[in-house]
Amino acid sequence: MKPTLNFLKEIASVAGDIIQQYVGDDLNIEHKGRTDLVTIADHDSEAYLIDAIHAAFPDHAIIAEESGGKEGQADHQWYLDPLDGTLNYAHGLPIYCVSIGYAFKGQMTLGVIYDPTREHYFCAQRGQGATLNGKPIHVSGYSNLIDCLLVTGFPNDVWDTPEDNTANFFQFTRRAQSVRRLGSAALDIAYVAAGWLDGFWEVEIFQWDIAAGGLLVQESGGVVTDTFGNPDYMKKPVSILCANAAIHAQMLEVLAEVRERNWAEK
C-alpha cells in the first residue's frame, strides 16, 4: 500500500505543532558538530513521524536525520527531516520547517515541506504539479543570471573541507543579482519552486534535506540535478542544483568554471 499526499500533509502538520510547542522553552541543545545542533524538538518531531509512518506502513523503509530511521522494503522509501534549520530554530529565527519525502521504486513520488511559523504547506505529487496551500506554484521565468536572486548553504565542516562552496559563492555573487543564505535547505528549495528565489545549489548535502524539495521543483517546472549536471541528485555523494531550465544551464557553467579553476590551481 502506498501513502497519499494528504497523509504526508497531516503528519507534517502534527510534527510542526510539536516543534512549535518547544519555542521559548529549554531545547536541551546538543552539538553534533561545531555548528551542527540537535534539540529536543528534533528528536520528538522525528520520533512522532517514524511512529506514524510505521503504524500506517509497517513494511516501509525510513531514512531520518537524527535516528537513522528504520529498515524495510526498498520499494517504499521515506526521507525525513524533522526540523530543517535547527540552528535558526535554536536562535529563535523563524526560518525552519519539516520535510517529508516518499519514493516508490527509487523515484521520488510525494513531497511535503511545512513551515509552521507561516503555515505554509508546499506539496508535490509526481505528475500532478506543486502547490502552496492548495494553489499551484511555478519556478521563476528569468532567463539571465544577472536578474536572479540565488540561495545556497555551506557544509557544517566548512573549515575542514576543500569543497567549502566559498569560491562558488563568490562567483555567483558577482554574476547574479544577489545570493542569500537562509539556513534551511528544504525551504530554500521550496522557495525556488514557488518562484521567490531563482536558483539553489549546495555542494555537500543530505538526502533528507532535498528529497521533498527536489520533487517540488520538478513539479513546478524546474530542473534538478547534482552540481555536475547528473539527473540522479539523490545519489551519494549528494549535491544539488535547481532552477528553471535557462538559469540551471547558466549556473551549471559557473560551477564547472569554478571547479576547473580550482583543479588548475592545485
Image (tube, helix red, strand yellow):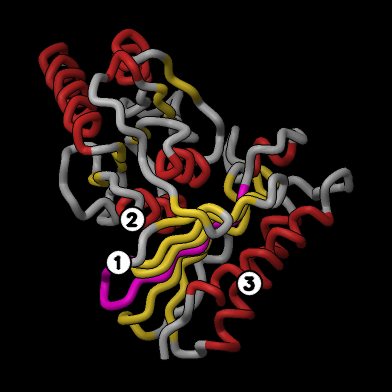
Residue at coordinates 42% horizontally, 61% vertically from top-left?
A: 124
Residue 164 place in picture, x, y as percent: 37, 26
Q: Specify whether 189 is left or right of 67.
A: left
Displayed quadrant of residue 71: bottom left
**Is residue 128 rendered to the left or right of residue 71?**
left
Q: Residue 259 at what x, y percent from top left? A: 18, 23
Q: Position of residue 128 (x, y in %)?
A: 35, 66
Q: Earlier in the sequence, mark 3 or mark 2?
A: 3
- Relative vertical location of residue 47 with respect to residue 230 in this rendering, above or below: below
Circle 3 sits in a helix, a strand or a loop, which is it?
Answer: helix
159 in relation to 71, above or below: above
Question: Residue 99 magenta-drawn?
Answer: yes
The crowding category of the residue bearing disc 1, from other C-alpha atoms within 10 Å (few below 14, some 14 to 19, many at least 20), is: few
Q: Which residues are magenta?
A: 97-108
Q: Which mark is residue 127?
A: 1
Amino acid on which the number 1 mark rests in the picture: Gly
User: Mark 2 or mark 1, which has the lower sequence index?
Assistant: 1
Callout 3 amino acid: Glu
Identify the element where label 2 is drawn. Answer: helix
| Residue at 60%, 88% in the rendered image | 55
For label 3, count other residues whose C-alpha is less than 10 Å away and answer few (under 14), some (14-19) or many (20+).
Answer: few
- Alpha-carbon span between mark 1 and mark 3: 21 Å
Q: Secondary structure at mark 1?
A: loop
Prevailing secondary structure class for the magenta stretch in the rendered image = strand
Mark 2 and 1 residues: CB-CB less than 8 Å, in contact?
Answer: yes
Image coordinates for residue 228, horizontal then vertical, percent:
17, 38
Q: Residue at x 69, y 45 (%)?
A: 118
